[in-house]
Image (cartoon, helix red, strand yellow):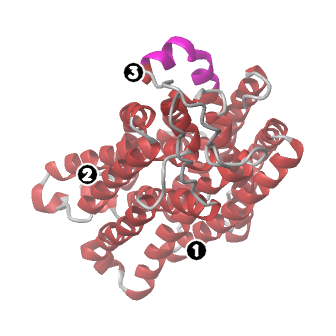
Amino acid sequence: MSLSTASTGASPQKAAPVLNSPAKVLTASLVGTTIEFFDFYVYATAAVLVFPALFFPGADPMTALLASFATFSIAFFARPLGAVVFGHFGDRVGRKATLVAALLTMGISTVIIGLLPTYDQIGVVAPLLLALCRFGQGFGLGGEWGGAVLMATENAPEGKKNWYGMFPQLGAPAGLFLSSGLFWILLQFMPQEALLSWGWRIPFIASILLIVVGLWVRLSITETPDFQKAIDNEERVAVPVIELFRNHKVSIVLGTFVALATFVLFYICTAYLLSYNVKVVQIPFTDALAIQIWGSVVFGAFIPLAGILAERFGRRLILTLTTVLIGAFSFLVPVLMVADEMRILGFVTLGMALMGLTYGLIGTALAAPFPTRVRYTGSSITFNFAGIFGASLAPYIATWLQASYGLAYVGYYICAAAAITLICIFASARGKV
């Protein structure tokens, strides 16, 4: 729609802005998050399959796995810092340039992991460098997610924000599918010895090809209409994070825990389950990865359904019902997660279907409470605080609970997260979640 008006003689007419087409907007948001989550999940898969032996040798298998999960968690503590830094520039300079910088940060960190020497080559320095690169991955993803969601929702026509906000969320199942699929292919064509020797490096180094694609797509889009309006109206603030914590503290706290169940459920159904299948049930690597690939397909299929249901019945209602179902699902953990591949497949199918319904809406829900001038920073910090509380230690906690008390306590962990999320949904202002 043209923004030009009849000239009054007082000032020249403004040229109508160049609007991004829906296809370009949705492609840019989806491709970017797919690449970022591919990088992120490649590490999660390697943390189970190869990193315990390559970077933490000498310990018993459980200790090595827990050490590997500890480095996995580092990224979640780096993500809020990335959210503050990239959010500042996203709210001051613009969504487009910041998204390009976040993509490069994440991508370069991932490629470097593929080039690292192992513990046998340089000793204790190897896991330290691995931890540093994992920090870089988290720092980049901390700035990516919020910008991608805003790129979609701030270009959305009226009444379509839930549908547009669903598209960048599809990057999570797509990235999980690609990362798991690539490791599955490697295991089909090389022995485990070759995978541990050099094959594990391929997914990390191959990320450079995805970076090129992502940059090409991201550089082809223009700034979002909402942010351009904030520039025109001189609404930008000098330090977004200060205004955020001064005026929007309640939205940050509630948003963090609204997303808690989403994160706990996802990382129990992926990283923890992969390690459980391989280490406890002793399912072959390829079969365990095939289960994870199936989970990513179910996850991806239910994200669009979430967008459709939210447009028809309301985002708040769908999030509430899904959270209740997650709580009910938690009591099936000791029933389904036994040494039976069909039951485990049922666990993954149900868990990832619920994950799709909640994750498909969480991006729009976390961005909604914040005004344009601090929305990049606010949505990013909220999402990444949720990552710390819900995801960073989820594989570690679930592994420890299962080993110490049994599978029922893994279910109680999911149930507690769902209860906290439900309370925070009810406490949030209607129309903001």
Q: Is any atom of residue 402 visible in this view?
A: no
**Relative to the observer, which residue lies in front, 77 or 117?**
77
Q: Give the left or right position of residue 345, taking residue 138 as reference.
A: right
According to the picture, the residue beneath numbered tag 2 turns out to be: 130
x, y percent for residue 131: 27, 46
Mark with earlier residue (3, 2): 2
The alpha-carbon separation of the residues under discs 3 and 1 comes to: 46 Å
How far from the left and from the top, in percent, is residue 395?
A: 51, 46
User: Is 252 part of what is drawn in magenta?
Assistant: yes
* Magenta region: 242-254
Q: Which residue is mark 3?
A: 239
257 versus 52 height, above or below: above
Left of 104 or right of it: where is 409?
A: right
Q: On the image, numbered disc 1 is attached to which residue?
A: 290
Q: Which element carries disc 2, helix, strand or loop?
A: helix
Label 1: how many Cα within 10 Å (few below 14, some 14–19, many 20+): some
Q: Label 1, secondary structure: give it.
A: helix
Q: What type of secondary structure mainly makes up the magenta span?
A: helix
Determine the CA span between mark 3 and mark 2: 32 Å
Instruction: Give whichever of 281, 79 is nearer the camera.
Output: 79
Residue for point 62% across, 22% down: 251
Query: Which numbered disc flags the more N-terminal residue, 1 or 2?
Result: 2
Q: Going from the N terminus, do you reach mark 3 or mark 1 first?
A: 3
